[in-house]
């Protein structure tokens, strides 16, 4: 007689079936949270930290990029989100501080709604979906920030909970994007998001782990590269920062389009100190704003690069003689480059007269035409 050890088999426990996309529960949770947070009132005093976010938000609402004029050690979205709230409040005539606090009350209610979804998805229970946000509403510090803010942690929690929900639903790229947005609000959030994707990767099938990490990374790169590109666009990066954080990614994108059969243009505003590095990124054309003469830019970007630009957009509000003279100057300076694409140095201002733009186009076509009769005289 022989004895055999019992065979152990692992079975995955199934959670109770719950409709994962049921909207009624999170909507009801958000409405209750709005009432609770609103009853707390909006007359809280501004301390030093809250004042910094209000001041940074005011700068953003007035068109000033984050970190310029006021230093905030957290991510740029910590100023951008209050700035968006104040800009929206200005449209309807609401005080900037009240606008920010109302907006952050809505964000806090959204947090509760997302907690409902996360608990319901994780535990497979509608009851858990209601209990979790009920407990969340008892967090005193978060309650204060919901109506007495703004603070960066409110926005960070929104993106971080959304990241966890998307990881659970295997939306890897969107989860990566939310993780990046949380990090762009408050940098330590990256560690929490990284732990979540690490757990999801370990639980997943071995053959799919690389794909999970790849999609998560690509999703995170989209808002990250967009943010860095914005700071390049407004001229808030040094050449060292550009070379370290932007140049490798710009080169990857531009080199990937090499066989596309279309001109590759790399453009930024306030980038006089970056033109040399931008020329190294691999574009066929480097855009130059109106602050840098094109003949000087041509010497910096390289002999095999064309330049694009760079009439000052404000010139179009001047008398036509001034517009004519400045446009011809730009064309002369652009002639020193390998090639020249004439345009404005930074877009068309909304109040610009369309007839002036039409005359400018005709002037440039006439001056650059091979037909002498097509040239306009100054």
Image: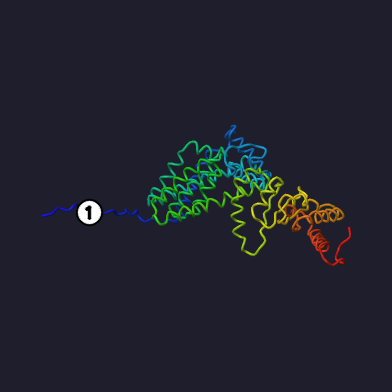
* Quadrant occupied by the C terminus: bottom right
Q: Residue at x 19, y 52 (%)?
A: 5
Q: Quadrant of residue 53?
A: top right
Foreground of the two, 84 or 235: 235
**Residue furthest out toward the right:** 377
76 left or right of 323 in image: left
**Residue in the picture at 62% in, 46% down:** 243
Colouring method of the image:
rainbow
Count of numbered circles in the view: 1
Viewer-side residue, 214 vs 283: 283
The extreme front residue here reads 303
Q: Where in the figure is residue 189, as x and y percent of width and height? A: 50, 42
Q: Secondary structure at mark 1?
A: loop
Q: Position of residue 52 (x, y in %)?
A: 61, 36
> Where does the N terminus fall, quadrant-wise?
bottom left
Say left or right for 67 vs 377: left
Residue that protrudes farthest toward the left in the picture: 1
For the residue pair 374 and 352, the one nearer the viewer reads as: 374
Q: Which residue is mark 1?
A: 7
What is the x, y in percent for residue 108?
Answer: 52, 44
Q: On the rendered structure, is 110 left or right of 199?
A: right
Q: Nearer the viewer, residue 184 or 31?
A: 184
Residue 164 located left or right of residue 53: left
Classed neighbour count for the residue bearing mark 1: other residues with Cα under 10 Å, few (<14), some (14–19), many (≥20): few
Residue 27 locus on image (x, y percent):
48, 51
């Amino acid at each position: 007689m022989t004895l055999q050890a019992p065979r152990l088999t692992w079975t995955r426990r199934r959670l109770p079936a719950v409709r994962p996309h049921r909207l009624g529960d999170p909507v009801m949770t958000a409405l209750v949270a709005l009432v609770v947070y609103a009853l707390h009132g909006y007359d809280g005093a501004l301390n030093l930290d809250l004042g910094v976010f209000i001041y940074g938000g005011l700068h953003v609402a007035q068109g000033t990029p984050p970190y310029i004029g006021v230093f905030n050690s957290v991510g740029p979205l910590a100023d951008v989100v209050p700035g968006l709230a104040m800009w929206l409040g200005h449209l309807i005539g609401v005080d900037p501080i009240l606008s920010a606090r109302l907006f952050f009350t809505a964000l806090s209610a959204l947090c509760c709604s997302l907690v409902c979804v996360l608990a319901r998805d994780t535990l497979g229970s509608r009851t858990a979906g209601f209990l979790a946000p009920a407990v969340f509403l008892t967090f005193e510090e978060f309650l204060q920030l919901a109506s007495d803010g703004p603070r960066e942690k409110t926005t960070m929690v929104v993106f971080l909970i959304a990241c966890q929900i998307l990881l659970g639903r295997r939306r890897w790229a969107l989860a990566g994007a939310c993780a990046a947005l949380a990090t762009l609000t408050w940098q330590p959030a990256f560690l929490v998001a990284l732990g979540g994707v690490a757990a999801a990767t370990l639980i997943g099938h071995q053959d799919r782990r690389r794909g999970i990490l790849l999609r998560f990374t690509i999703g995170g790169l989209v808002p990250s590269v967009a943010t860095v590109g914005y700071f390049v666009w407004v001229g808030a990066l040094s050449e060292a920062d550009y070379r370290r954080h932007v140049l490798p990614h710009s080169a990857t994108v531009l080199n990937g389009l090499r066989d596309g059969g279309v001109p590759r243009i790399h453009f930024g505003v306030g980038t006089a100190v970056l033109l040399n590095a931008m020329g190294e990124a691999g574009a066929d054309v480097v855009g130059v704003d109106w602050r840098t003469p094109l003949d000087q830019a041509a010497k910096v970007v390289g002999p095999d690069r064309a330049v694009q630009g760079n009439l000052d957009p404000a010139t179009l509000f001047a008398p036509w003689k001034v517009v004519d003279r400045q446009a011809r100057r730009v064309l002369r300076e652009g002639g020193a480059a390998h090639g020249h694409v004439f345009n404005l140095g930074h877009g068309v201002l909304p109040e610009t007269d369309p007839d002036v733009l039409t005359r400018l186009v005709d002037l440039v076509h006439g001056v650059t035409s091979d037909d002498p009769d097509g040239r306009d005289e100054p």
